[in-house]
Image: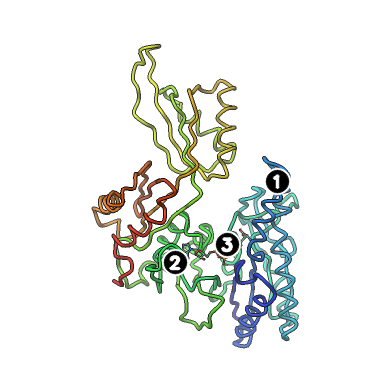
Amino acid sequence: MPVLVMKFGGTSVADLARIENVARKVLREVDRGFDVIVIVSAMSGKTNELVGWVESTSKLYDAPEYDAVTSSGENVTAGLMALRLQEIGVPARSWQGWQVPINTTSAHGSARFISIPRENIDAKFAEGFKVAVVAGFQGVSAEGRITTLGRGGSDTTAVAFAAAFGAVRCDIYTDVDGVYTTDPRITSKARKLDRIAYEEMLELASLGAKVLQTRSVELAMRYKVRLRVLSSFEDSDDTSGTLVCDEDEIMESKVVSGVAHSRDEAKLTLVRVEDRPGIAAAIFGPLADAGVNVDMIVQNISDLEHPADKRAYTDMTFSCPTNQVLRAQKAMEDARSAGLFAFANLVVDSDVAKISVVGIGMRSHAGVAAKMFSALAAENVNIKVIATSEIKISVLIDRKYMELAVQALHDAFDLDKVG
Ligand code: ADP
Ligand code: ASP
Ligand code: MG
């Protein structure tokens, strides 16, 4: 039997009525002759609640226990979905990560897949079960502890199962009907894309477009999984939604394809660190060891030969997610106490957002940066940090201008227009 993977996000399984709604979508695919692997998220808001409970109990929490608690939301929806499918006559069985088993690394909170053996689920299909309902977002480490894959990780579970079972397609059902030129909640001018290249989707996801978890796009690209994003609230057929596919399957060619934003950014500046060989390694080593995901880095111009001691000093600015600021501060204070380096002050700005424009056309077109900066200037938005790569330009700005900046860039690059 051909296998189809269907993933339902939190809003799609938010209550029993919605679980019934998506169970009927699964039934339709079973009736079309598929063995279906359903991946479910926790009910919407559940994982946030569980994370909140962990953080209220322990500020710098133990990661294995964070995973023990936060993985539980998916167990509930997997069981409920299997029950609902049975009620409408579909032989279905639920699977928690350890039962498959979904083998992952021991990096709690951001574990990666090692292997997904097919035997157990295949054996159930062979017995006549038509659907395997798998709890997303979780796995099991070699030590036998439950792990989680990072927020939004059920998308990655879905793609990994599609690769492991050679699925004809991996359908990601969510609360929007596809991938848009920007988050449709920010501007009504956002336009749904019929297709988007893996590379562009990868950049958009990693720059904050949470419609797909970054790692899921990476896996889809590596294993050539046909990945589709569509709405669980609308009727759909094989052409609905947005297909994430190879660049050469795409007709539309724009220099910039989308605008992404990330709200939860913080900018930290170490003021007056000595400017000497090895200083960057001394700063970013301890940050990495503390699990801080440093994103942008700027080393400011050096103050050569300070009159007081004739040494050179500089300021070092970097950005990281807001929920890692405490860890970053502690890592820097500890490094200072251990004598790795000195600094005058650590200035934290937790009110910034990152806005990015993305497009594979940027490889062969000049002037995108200039256009982006003038559009922001026209709105009087100050740019704090800039970073570029081959197919994206990102800026950090004050968070209060985030929506305005996204709208201005969407207009400047004519993203509401086709072609
Ligand atoms: P789920 O719970 O189904 O996993 P998510 O909330 O993780 O859903 O992702 C869907 C949301 O992603 C949408 O509601 C939308 O606000 C947001 N989003 C951000 N950028 C985009 C984009 N470019 N296209 C579509 N949705 C986007
Ligand atoms: N429930 C998890 C989260 O909210 C995983 C997911 O929904 O993809 O992050
Ligand atoms: Mg999601």
**Image spot of residue 291 (x, y percent):** 58, 41
Q: Among all residues in the image, which is located at the extreme bottom?
A: 31
- Above or below residue 185? Residue 386 is above
Q: Is mark 2 within 8 Å of ligand 1?
A: yes
* Numbered circle sitting on residue 277: none
- Above or below residue 354? Residue 228 is below
- Frontmost of labels 2 and 3 is 2
**Image spot of residue 145 (x, y percent):** 74, 52
Q: Identify the element where label 3 is drawn.
A: helix
Q: Identify the element where label 1 is drawn.
A: helix
Q: Please name whichever residue, 22 or 26, is drawn nearer the observer in this view of the structure.
A: 22
The three-letter amino acid code for the residue at tag 1 is: Ser
**Image spot of residue 62 (x, y percent):** 71, 43
The mark that comes first in sequence, 2 or 1, is 1
Near mark 3 (Cα within 10 A), the count class, few <14, some 14-19 or many ≥20, is: many
Near mark 2 (Cα within 10 A), the count class, few <14, some 14-19 or many ≥20, is: some
Q: Are marks 2 and 3 in contact (CB under 8 Å)?
A: no
* Numbered circle sitting on residue 156: 3
Tell me where residue 46 sits by quadrant: bottom right
Q: What residue do we see at 73% from left, 66% from top? A: 76
Q: Quadrant of ligand 3?
A: bottom right
Quadrant of the image containing the N terminus? bottom right
Q: Please name whichever residue, 354 or 282, is drawn nearer the observer in this view of the structure.
A: 354
The mark that comes first in sequence, 3 or 1, is 1
Q: Which residue is mark 1?
A: 56
The three-letter amino acid code for the residue at tag 2 is: Pro
* Numbered circle sitting on residue 184: 2
- Above or below residue 385? Residue 221 is below
The three-letter amino acid code for the residue at tag 3 is: Thr
